[in-house]
Amino acid sequence: MEAAEHLHEHDHNHEHGVPVQEILKTALLIGLGLYFVVLIATGSLTNYINVRFSWLSYVAALIFLLLGATSAVRLMQSRRHDHHPHEHQHDHDPEHGSISWAALAVIAVPLVLGTLIPSRPLGAAAVDSELSANNIGGDVTAAFNIPPEQRNILDWVRALNAAEDPATLNGQTVDVVGFVYRGEAYTSDQFLVARFTISCCVADAVAIGLPVAWPEDLPLDAWVRVRGQFVPGDFQGETRPVIQPTRVELVEQPEHPYLYP
């Protein structure tokens, strides 16, 4: 009788088949791997991390796909075992080593959010009231070794911070690309041509910008190319170099929207 009950229990375990958690784990691992592949293939990866660390995403994609493939092979082996119980007389517990629902949720959240939320870089909506021109790191003095017309917004911010008298930059040619940002206290003929800098990823992003005197209305968050020169100006009650453009034109978002200290 006991032997019959044991055999019935063994057959009952096989009827349950592979745990649902294991199937979901396999799907999530493969899904995460494919998600990284899509980010890499579409160029959206730089919306999240410093381009210098993009190789980590290649490694992550490979690891997730390998783990998913390994898990899929185990699932198929387990199903073959269930269909041929006479080939294995030892006890087989499909629940052994299965992943918890809590762990599955941790894996699923970034995949679901990444899939549902469109990939786009930080813009004007992410700028807080303390748009910074300080503590941006890097070699500040190196900005002076770059010809003025080749400096980007980060280079100019460094040059302005490093100059003993920022007024010495007045008259220099400026040619920069950034998005339009306006604070509540700005006058109607002022905006900042801004960019975000990231050292590692968007979690450490810092917004920086240069003041522009321009009477024409521009869409908030629009990407623009500003060409002109620095002139003495007033910005938020402070006398400082302000860009006086000879031309402001709408442009496409750069391939790499962030600047890297």
Image (tube, rainbow, N blue to C red):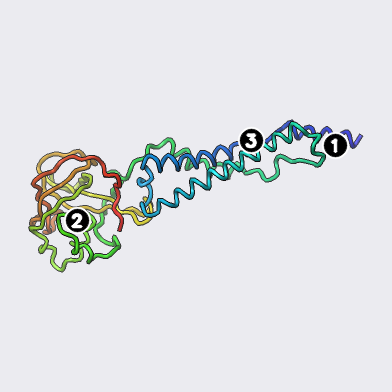
Q: Which tag, 3 or 1, sits closer to the chain's start? A: 1
Considering only vertical position in the picture, is 228 above or below 163? Answer: above
- Which quarter of the figure is the C terminus placed in? bottom left
Residue 181 percent coordinates (x, y): 22, 45
Question: Which residue is depicted at the point 24% across and 56% down?
Answer: 154
Residue 191 placement, left or right of 17? left
* Circle 3 residue: 20
* Circle 2 residue: 151
Task: Find the distance from the CA under tag 2 to the CA under tag 1.
Answer: 78 Å
Q: Nearer the viewer, residue 23 or 81?
A: 81
Residue 167 placement, left or right of 46? left
Q: Nearer the viewer, residue 45 or 87?
A: 87
Residue 16 percent coordinates (x, y): 72, 32
Mark number for residue 109?
none
The quadrant in which residue 208 appears is: bottom left
Q: Which tag, 3 or 2, sits closer to the chain's start? A: 3
Task: Residue type at mark 2: give it.
Answer: Arg
Task: Residue type at mark 1: give it.
Answer: His
Task: Find the distance from the CA under tag 3 to the CA under tag 1.
Answer: 24 Å
- Which quarter of the figure is the N terminus placed in? top right
Q: Which tag, 2 or 1, sits closer to the chain's start? A: 1
Residue 194 placement, left or right of 67? left
* Circle 1 residue: 6
Helix, strand or loop at mark 2:
loop
Helix, strand or loop at mark 3:
helix
Question: Which residue is depicted at the point 31% across and 45% down?
Answer: 122
Question: Which residue is depicted at the point 33% across and 53% down?
Answer: 205
Mark 3 neighbour density, 10 Å: few (under 14) some (14–19) many (20 or more): few
Task: Find the distance from the CA under tag 3 to the CA under tag 2.
Answer: 56 Å
Task: Residue type at mark 3: give it.
Answer: Val
Q: Please report contact status of discs 3 and 2: CB closer than 8 Å, yes or no.
A: no
Residue 220 percent coordinates (x, y): 22, 40
